[in-house]
Amino acid sequence: MSTAKKATKPKAGKHPGGRPTKYSADILKKTWEYIASCTDEEFEYHKTQGISSNTFERKIRVNIPTMQGLSLHLKVNLDTLNEWALLHHEFSGAIGELKAEQARRLMNNGLNGDYSPQMAKFLLSANHGMKERVDATTNDKDLPAAVQVNNLKNLTDDELIKLTQGDTSGTST
């Protein structure tokens, strides 16, 4: 007599792979609402007060759209957002728009001084792959093969002489 259990089909209305997804058209709608709601707010800061004059400074309360912000807005884990972007084409488009808007605002406002240029540079580098320079030796690509370096300590005098004269035959690496 066999003790193996028979595989059964899930009952109607049950999710076959565990917990059902929270993704719905409402999630997509809330995502677009979040992106639209992320606007910077200008305000005046009373910097100094003197006898004959006051000094005010214009400040910006930055509110750029972020994946972390969307995660909090939708009350789901960041990993869930990334998974939904892989599974749902329309959600992936919204995430692409969020990232493009973030990059656009970081570039424009970092250049004109509304945002900290150093912070904008850091975020563009960390989140959008924009770098200040390119590795000139490999053009930021992996090396084609492992680099081998001769261990000169193990070479004989004759091998060292040949090596200095450009003859590499017979030398060990």
Image (spheres, grey):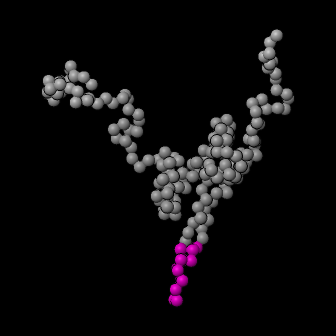
Determine the residue positioned at 61% across, 65% down: 41
Q: Position of residue 154 (x, y in %)?
A: 23, 27
Asked if residue 138 is among those painted magenta in the image, a careful observer would answer: no
157 horizontally vs 102: left or right: left
Determine the residue positioned at 57% across, 52% down: 102
Q: Position of residue 86 (x, y in %)?
A: 64, 36
Quarter of the figure with the N terminus: top right
* Residue 92 visible in the shown view: no
Q: Position of residue 150 (x, y in %)?
A: 26, 29
Above or below, comparing residue 23 to residue 9 in the picture? below
Asked if residue 45 is among those painted magenta in the image, a careful observer would answer: yes
Q: Position of residue 162 (x, y in %)?
A: 15, 25
Above or below, comparing residue 97 to residue 49 in the picture? above
Q: Residue furthest right?
A: 12
142 horizontally vs 80: left or right: left
Determine the residue positioned at 31% across, 29% down: 148
Q: What kind of secondary structure does the magenta stretch mostly adopt?
A: strand
Above or below, comparing residue 108 to residue 141 in the picture? below
Task: Compare residues 36 and 129 and report the one nearer the observer.
Answer: 129
* Residue 159 visible in the shown view: yes
Magenta stretch bounds: 44-57
Quarter of the figure with the C terminus: top left
Q: Residue furthest top?
A: 1
Task: Compare residues 143 and 25 and report the one nearer the observer.
Answer: 143
Determine the residue positioned at 53% across, 77% down: 47
**Quarter-of-image position of residue 85:** top right
**Quarter-of-image position of residue 22:** top right
